[in-house]
Amino acid sequence: MSKLKPRCRLYLQVAPPFTARQNEYLSQALAELSPACVLIRSDGAALDPAVLDGLIDRIQGAGAACLIEDGIAAAEDLGADGVHIAADEKIYADARKSLGESANIGVACGLGRHDAMALAESGADYVAFSALDADDFDALSDTVAWWAEIFVVPCVAWDIGDVREAVALTERGVDFIAPPSSIWDGDDPLAVLRDMDAAIGSIRREA
């Protein structure tokens, strides 16, 4: 009997301003959907340590890993599970030195196959692939399929807001789907996330 890959899971993102509306939706998503991870993005803003601390506690209390975008010092100081960083060997080395071997360190690779291979070899816990624009979805899908066929380090499809695209990427072997942080601004983000979670979770893939 063929061995099956683990089911694809959601990887959520939140970004400032951390409004009451976004916080309420996040709490419901954590309770209902059991995402694998939540990334706290900075989007260039200085993040209040007290706000970060509260978010980290809530996310980890729900059983999800909590990462901070580019926040090596904040992750170390506040006890986050790790960071999401650019695909840069020096930044990765600094993050690993500061946070230790047990930290979850993921790298944003765009469509860069060489960067993904180099950082995975260095020890990155996941690589995140993203399309540069809507016309690059086929390139993203092909990159995910290539990675899933060859490598064991998990890959994330980044900023996927469409359920059909999430399904197509899951069928090609992606391990995690990361909807954009802007999803919380929609009319009913939980409905979209529920549909996406159910759709990707129903697909089984051979390892």
Image: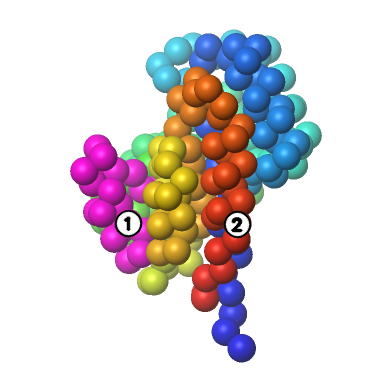
Secondary structure state at the residue bearing disc 1? helix
Tell me what residue is drawn at x 62 percent, y 41 percent: 194
Q: Can residue 177 be seen in the rendering of this structure?
A: yes
| 192 or 100: nearer the viewer | 192
Residue 80: horizontal and vertical position, in percent? Answer: 64, 32
- Give the residues drawn in magenta, as a range: 127-146
Quadrant of image for the N terminus: bottom right
Q: Is residue 120 above or below residue 128?
A: below
| 117 or 28: nearer the viewer | 28
Q: Nearer the viewer, mark 1 or mark 2?
A: 2
Judging by the rendered image, the residue that carries numbered circle 2 is 201
Residue 141 numbered mark, or none: 1
Q: Main secondary structure of the magenta part?
A: helix
- Say whether disc 1 or disc 2 marks the residue closer to the N-terminus: 1
Q: Can residue 82 be seen in the rendering of this structure?
A: no
Q: Is the residue under label 2 in contact with that under label 1 (CB below 8 Å)?
A: no
Left or right position of 87 against 99: left
Tell me what residue is drawn at x 23 percent, y 46 percent: 136
Secondary structure state at the residue bearing disc 2? helix
Was residue 137 drawn as part of the magenta stretch in this picture? yes
Residue 21 in which image quadrant? top right
Left or right position of 157 against 72: left
Residue 11: horizontal and vertical position, in percent? Answer: 55, 42
